[in-house]
Image: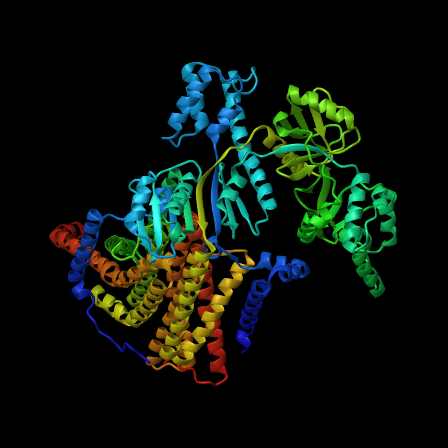
Amino acid sequence: MRFFHKTNIDFMGKRKMWYTISAIIIFLGMLSLAIKGFHFGIDFLGGTELIIEFSHPPDIGKVRTMMDDAGFLKSEIKAYGNPQRLLLRTQLQGEGTVIGDRIKAALNKTFPELNPKVLQEQKIGPKVGQELRRNALLAVLTSLVAMGLYVAFRFKFIYGVGAVVALFHDVAVAIGFVSFLDGLTIHTNFEIDQSMIAAFLTIIGLSMNDTVVIFDRIRENQKIYRSMGLEELINRSLNEVLSRTLITSSTIFIITLILFFLGGEVNRGFAFALTIGITTGTYSSIYIASAIVLDYTNYKQRKKLQPAAAQKPSYETINQ
Amino acid sequence: MKKNRGKLVFILGCVLLSFYFLYPTYKDYKFTKELRSLTGPDSLKYIDQNETAIRKARTDRIKLGLDLQGGMRVVLEVNVMKLLEDMAKNKDETFNSIINELRAEAKNTDQDLIDLLELKFKAKQVRMSRYYGSIRDNDDDVVKKLRDETGNAIDRAMAIVRNRIDQYGVSEPSIQKQGGRRIIVELPGVSKEEEVRQLLQGTALLEFKLLIEPEIAAKVYESIDKSLAGEVVSDSLLGDTTKKIAAKQDTTKADTTNPLDTSLAQLPEDQMKAQEEARKKHPFFALANTFQRENQGWDGNLYTAEDDRGKVIRILERPDIRRYIPSDMAFVWSNKGEIVAEGKRYFVLYAVKRMPELTGGVIVNAHATIDPTSNLPVVDMEMNSDGSRDWARITGANVKKRIAIIMDNSCFSAPVVQTKITGGRSQITGMANVEEAKLLEIVLKAGALPAPVDIIQQATVGPSLGEDSINQGIWAALLALALTAAFMIVYYSTGGTMADLALLLNILFVLGVLAGFQGTLTLPGIAGLILTVAIAVDANVLIYERIREESVTGKTLSASIDAGYKRAFTAIFDSNLTAFITGVILFQFGSGPVKGFALTLMIGIVASVFSAVVVSRVIIEMLVEKGKHVSFG
């Protein structure tokens, strides 16, 4: 069986259009980020978080009043996966685990008939949250730099730049989507927590993987078709690996989609980010990473040609 | 065939090794299933019978993270602020104002508290030695001492926490030091927060208790033994002496009550029978051995193998047994087991007086050193004046008797009192090595100077949420795997089938490595495993697409396979290496569950490159050599 026979698509010809589309998507994402922002998970914020299961869906308004009465103003209350499960979170800090205990006591007092059960409890001190945030940022930046260096070393410098820009693009798009969809339904509570950071890093890894396969083919073809122009060469390479790119990406896409729908609440944010990431990762290898290599090379050639043309006579005279 | 023989042997070796590592996990699963089907007394009986095997399977199986089996994860931090307060002596107004300023400042800064404290003292032009250390110390000396002390505090806290958790009876607890001030405690299957919190945070209780004299203990143990064997315990027996125990030992010379004699020789069958009979005759001593040597008096201790400890505890708690135990008598176990015989770890059961003679508050200092004359490790212990007075009375009245040093209900040492000790300075000898002496020092200090810890992070996952997520995770993983496998067969026909085979081996390898290296499987870990599948598929796709390309150019099948593998390799290598780098970074910076994800991802990447580049190739080449037609769709 074969889906893709010899294709001959002019990928690079339309790169300007795709630059624009990417820019628009990222702009919209940043807009959502600016307006809606995103939620940090408990591990980055610090505070106390409880996931409670009730025997019947409780009245959220009543839960809020209860929390306010118990002294936890501005706490976060939302359904977690299904209406019977609630996530309660407050950023108040207390000695040890008193906050969690007070919330539990209040719940048992207010909803004795709903038999509230604690499924999960987390308490994170403010310093720890700070530390984890710093570590997460460091992890993402380090991996971007490490990837860029590796590619620059294995290929050429501009390839490394192209790859890293593509990675930035992927992470930016993913953050935009996460921010936009967060809280739209009870199944999409996407928070920037540790597992989301793990997802971003995985996106970086997968996108890189894709980019490297394409760069590898370009490198190989450069040795075979020495006189071919770069644009044609890149197009040729992209067409040659297109079949692999799409099959791998769609397999991963399906896997992450299954994880998203069936993998449970805990893995959902992670799976969602990956689903977005694998799509943008595939696209960015072509229209960002490869396109930047092409544009930069063209730009350098033009720059080299222009001054060279202007100065040509003087050099010749000196040489002769 | 020949050129692949070496590789084939290697692959088979890996497969066998993986199965070997995974076997305990399978056993554990079987035991758990068996135990679930049994109820009440039946399940207790089953545990009694298979305790060793169950325990072994437990320790060697793949560990499940807290998110999968439920449990508690607590991060403790030594409270340096409180420690600085507790350590000071002669506190006055000046000191209090300094400490209050420091406390206010500490909330908003990450700076080192001891540095800050030093600055504060300098600013007020007060010598630190007024409150810390001895008068002759200059500020630098004091700072150094404070630093040592805060460093020691974490060791003390670790010792306290470890001891309590061991007693609490959590299976597979993990207690790790993180940096200089933090302790990470993971307690699988535990959800009673209140209890655990008290367990972790309360001040350690250090007690000195007199050991019950061997003669009296012997009578009690005799009665218990008789009662268990179904014999009538006559009142006259309660007047017997240790000699009787010694006699009993003689009659059952070759039985398990004295494994020292039997451990080396293979037991002939009739001796095995005799052993079995002795077991029936002395059910209690079969579990709690006296380990008495010839021509030596019995010291009053019983020794119980690690696996039998639960049984002995259950026996001693039985109401029908309790009546033989005097009301002023209590039992404590040694803090750790020692290998006495048959390579088994034995715990010592001490019979002690219920009321402590002294508690740890009287200890001023303790210090482990090597005695210069004897060259043996010793611990010097110093008490305050109140304690010294009591200590002189206690030791004076109990010369040649033993006093147990007990922290939080486990005995760390039970030295014999040599003389009456006046002046409050005692030396404890008889430790096997420096580490033991150091531990005793830590324990003694824990009585004097608590190691205040704060819970800075705590997570409890209820077992039901854990079960939910494990089921959903596994279903998703299986579905993803099945779909991918089906697609590969449809798209690449024979090649796809081989790839699937390699894929299965890949998963086997990852799990095998996890089990072999005591890794932990977490929910993100399962996600990592699924991603591994994706990466493995990618490697195969790269190769097969290449083989297709090559065969279009008119090469023979085996030539295209060769070229396909060769040409695809650089792409596979580069792309997997970059993914591996992200794994390493994630492992470095992540914590808890994220580390689990990174770990499976890294193992998975290595395994998938191996299974795609080596395993599937060997299989395909072997098929081609046999003249089978291998199609790549």
Query: Height in image: B79 above or below B350?
Result: above
Residue pictured at 39% horizontal, 49% vertical = A112
Query: Height in image: B195 above or below B560?
Result: above
Q: State which quadrant residue A299 falls in.
A: bottom left
Identity of the residue furthest to the top in this view: B125
Q: Left or right: where does residue B307 sit relative to residue B520?
A: right
Q: Of residues B354 and B346, which is closer to you in this image?
A: B354
* Residue A269 position within the rendered picture, expressed as x and y whole percent measured from the top left: 33, 56
Q: Left or right: where does residue A36 sit relative to residue A191?
A: left
* Residue A44 position within the rendered picture, expressed as x and y whole percent measured from the top left: 35, 44
* Residue B417 position within the rendered picture, expressed as x and y whole percent measured from the top left: 76, 30
Quarter of the image with the N terminus of chain A in it: bottom left
* Numbered circles on residues, count: 0
Residue pictured at 29% horizontal, 55% vertical = A167
Q: State which quadrant residue B456 falls in.
A: top left
| Residue A301 in sight | no
Query: Height in image: B580 above or below B452?
Result: below
Q: Of residues A289 and B159, which is closer to you in this image?
A: B159
Query: Height in image: B385 above or below A97?
Result: above
